[in-house]
Image (tube, rainbow, N blue to C red):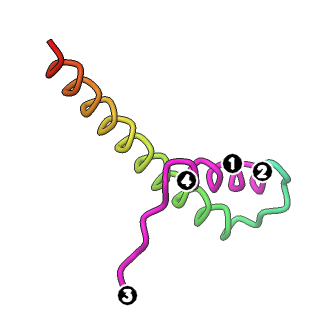
Amino acid sequence: MAKQELSYKESLEEIEKIIHQIESGETDIDELSVLVKRAATLIKDCKSKLKSTEDDLNQTLNDME
């Protein structure tokens, strides 16, 4: 089964949930490692989506000239 890609908004919401979990202080050390790795992956995906959107917008604006 193919891995479903999250939308930018869904990724941000998951990052926020992870932050709240970590800030609660109730996360054990083993889970902390998993959460940080997941957050890093989500952040990387968000940055990629932002860059892609920026490139698309710039191309559209350049095409209008």
- At a point 58% along the width and 55% down the height, the residue shown is 10
- Asked if disc 1 and disc 2 are in contact, CB closer than 8 Å, the reply is yes
Q: Amino acid at mark 3?
A: Met
Residue sitting at the far front: 64
Q: Indicate which disc residue 11 carries.
A: 4
Residue assigned mark 1? 16
- Report the mark closest to the observer, 3 or 1: 3
Q: Is residue 46 above or below residue 42?
A: above
Residue assigned mark 3? 1
Indicate which disc, 2 or 3, sits on the residue closer to the N terminus.
Answer: 3
Horizontal and vertical percent position of residue 65: 14, 12
Image position of 8 (left or right of 34): left
- At a point 18% along the width and 18% down the height, the residue shown is 64
The residues tagged by marks 4 and 1 sit, at their Cα atoms, a distance apart of 9 Å
- Report the mark closest to the observer, 4 or 2: 4
Magenta residue span: 1-22
The residues tagged by marks 3 and 1 sit, at their Cα atoms, a distance apart of 27 Å
- At a point 37% along the width and 44% down the height, the residue shown is 49
Residue assigned mark 2? 20
Q: Amino acid at mark 2?
A: His
Asked which secondary structure carries label 3, the reply is loop
Other-residue count near label 4 (Cα within 10 Å), few / some / many at <14 / 14–19 / ≥20: some
